[in-house]
Amino acid sequence: MTVLACIALPLLAPVLITAMRRWPNPREAITLLTSVGLLLLVSSLHDAVLHGSRPAIDLLEPLPGLKIGFEVEPLGLLFALLASFLWVVTSVYSIGYLRSLNEWHQTSFYCFFAMALGSTMGIAFAGNLFTLFIFYELLTLSTYPLVTHAGTAAATFAGRMYLGYLLGTSVILLLLALIWTWTLAGTLDFRSGGILEGIVTPGVAGILLILFIFGIGKAALIPFHLWLPAAMVAPTPVSALLHAVAVVKAGVFTVLKVAVYLFGIDFLAEIPATQWLMYVAATTLLLAALVALRQDNLKLRLAWSTISQLSYIVLGALLATPLGIVGGGMHIVTHAFAKITLFFCAGAILVATQKTRISEMHGLGRRMPITMGAFFIASLSIIGLPPLGGFWSKWFLALGTLDTQQYLMLGVLLAGSMLNVAYLLPIPMRAFFSREPGNPGDSGLQEAPSACVAALLVTTAACVVLFFFPDPVYRLLQLLVQG
Amino acid sequence: MLSTHLPALQVVLPLASAPVCLLLRHPRHAWACALTISWLVLAIAVMLVQQVAATGTISYAIGAWATPWGIEYRIDMAGALMILVVATIGAVVLPFAGRSIQQEIRKKHSGLFYTCFLLCLAGLLGIVVTGDAFNLFVFLEISSLSSYVLISLGCTRRALTAAFQYLVMGTIGATFILIGVGLLYMLTGTLNMVDISQRLTEVADTRTIRVAFAFVTVGVSIKLALFPLHLWLPNAYTFAPSVVSAFFAATATKVGIYVLLRLFFTVFGIGFSFVAMHVGEIMMLLAAAAMMVASLVAIFQNNVKRMLAYSSVAQIGYIILGISLASRDGVAAGMIHLFNHALIKCALFLSLGCIFLRLGSVELQDMRGLAKRMPWTMAAFVAGGLSLIGLPLTSGFISKWYLVGAALTDGYWPLAVLILLSSLLALIYIWRVVETAYFQVPGAGMPLVKEAPASMLIPAWLLIGANFYIGVDASLVSGIAHQAAGILIEQGVR
């Protein structure tokens, strides 16, 4: 029942939010209460899952044998915990952000945001691929109004890209893979060890794998990545929670689920296509980082960085070794905290100074020391330096490449980190060490509203905490690879 | 016992009461009469489906003349599904018609409208229940002639040319069917379909039978608007009154497909149709072309009704594709989509009818910013559109699931890709409307319109609700369709 409540709570919250549309304070109170309630609900599942129980419930059966059902397993729980915790933080941040920018249609913003979170919970707890697919599509549809929130021609165009890429890949490639798997295996349940081994040859499984990996457009592999930079026209809280955490992580989460529970790690290693897909992931990783270098718009640079970072996780899954899976799972968490901090900073800068371009950010560190300090720390976490959480994910990914003798991939990982340094660190450097042109004097502090600053401080702190206490995350992932 | 005469009543009731509507001079009285009849027809249809489900195929001899001399009415599972579709759609669109017809048709013609509507309903139901090849032709003509009138009642003058175009094409189709039936009668000496099928084996390997097969196939293909014989359909649907478009899109072409099923499987048999005459390959090719070409054309339409008309041609392609596989799964998938598409397309045309009532136009540029003024109507359109695209939890998804599954099981993976590709094209043409209605601002001088009346919204939303229900629990439809397909395949293999 808790599982159903986790999904139903955010999906039903819009009813109350709409009812309160005339009174902004109670309306935001409902968002906050829902997010806190969701976090508590998801947390209450943690102990049971850690001790080996797998709460499950079947809801409906649209076709014989094809169920809409939910099951809580370690990876899903980890994803749900991550998303629901960050929703609380983002809710606080959104209130400060939307009110100081005086955005329009705030009620519908909060409604669709809650629905997007509900869909994310559905993805996290899906008991089979069919259920996951339903909520995957629901997530696309519920975030579409958020992407087009500005209502401008540019936003409409971005919305078109968003739907075109995400629905296109999922309807043509992913659904084909889904139905094909169904006709071959007769089930779409997630089982540890996979359902495909022994049913198909590695060759056919390779075609299926290619359909799956490219069909999950939310993982943003080249050539299906352009929707993510396009989605940056959305308000910053959307970019922060949805396009750095919920939506994109739903993509790589699905990749990990497919790798572990559909193919099984052992069978995945036997498929020849795995190696080729690894090259695709490596190419995406490096090319997106190179493109990020050339972006002047801060949010766009972060978006390209996200594309690059997602490929770390896909790569981790494709290494088909427990260490790679653990590294990928770790990276879902550590990258989420670091990237959401970076987006919070970008939004804070926009709110406080109306600046969106990196070239305008000279000397900004003097005016916004807290924000730029947080930006610096989060950048270090993305790069993977201790003492920050990002270190662990890169550590396990690197171990995974060594474990499978993929030395080329190790090189790619290291080159990627160098590129991270090159596209992230100049921003705080410029902010702290250069002066604003035409304004040699000290203009005093000019931070964003306290709600925004508080939110980004929490996520920055989490980046540090994750370095010293990675154990809760590690234990869940350990359960995943042990089966 | 009344219940034994239900097959006859199903047809006779609307047929006999049609002229009554002409005598009732007041439009509301005519409407009330037609409405009552359509609901009675639905009640009979439901009872018939229950009978078929309980006792299997029903055979009814008209006037107690024994077959094969008399006319036999024969309803098996596939027929039961069809009468359910036709009767349901009839009963759902008539409440909608009251308000819509009042605005779109001149008052003195409304009696005529309801008469023709009931005649058309009787004709379509007759085609489904009859087991006699010539009787089938008669009912086909009843439904066709009344539909020419219904289309010509549309409020612009172009409705007349559209009706004339349909008349010419439809008559060619009907003539071909008659020639085919004549040739069959010549060689077998019987008109009862089951009887024909039994006697056909001896004469199957003659040129006459092959010619007869070709004539009826082409004739029926015109009626069901199979690409490239669909040319009458876009104009007819665009210029007909809104209710008529909704009714035809859901029933007329679907009944045509049913006739095709009867011919291929019951009369000629799989061995002749699919193995000797290779009709499967031809149909598959045409269906695939319909799915792609008609969807592409739909993207470039600025009249939304015409866009939906082209979409119908594409969706007919899906259904024919399933049938062309000639496997149990394929035929069942085709029939499931036949049912689902009837619901979806009818709901979409009904919501367009609501828009036409208020705006007096269904041109895309007149629909800018409409979602604010008519939120329920546009929401129905979007819901129907999502189902047309085939997103999960809608009935469109169920059809696509079965169709792609059937194609993959038989090893036709390029077809599976085409089906999915075509649903992406559906996304494009539906989303053009969504963007216009939700994101664009109304132009200067556009009328401030209100939401459509409840009498029109409720029928549309009933169908949308049914569509979501099937998306969540398809066991009933899929069960009937698989059973029906099983019977058809069984009859076909001999």
Image (cartoon, coloured by chain):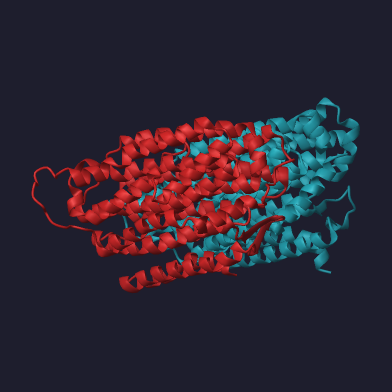
Chain colours: A red, B cyan
Q: Is residue A137 above or below residue B177?
A: below
Q: Residue A125, position in %: x, y?
A: 57, 59
Residue at the location (21% across, 54% down)? A368
| Residue B433 visible from this viewpoint | yes
Q: Residue B384, position in %: x, y?
A: 53, 54
Residue at the location (72% across, 39% down)? B409
View extreme (top): residue: B207
Residue at the location (25% across, 46% down)? A356
Q: Who is closer to the viewer here, A338 or A22? A: A338
Q: Is residue A1 above or below residue B144?
A: below
User: Is B272 left, or right, of A294 in this rendering?
Assistant: right
Q: How many marks?
A: 0
Q: Who is closer to the viewer here, B409 or B115? A: B409
| Residue B233 visible from this viewpoint | no
Residue at the location (63% across, 45% down)? A178
Location of residue A284 (image quadrant)? top left
Q: Residue A129, position in %: x, y?
A: 62, 51
The N terminus of chain B - image quarter: bottom right
Location of residue B8 (image quadrant)? bottom right
Q: Residue B46, position in %: x, y?
A: 72, 63
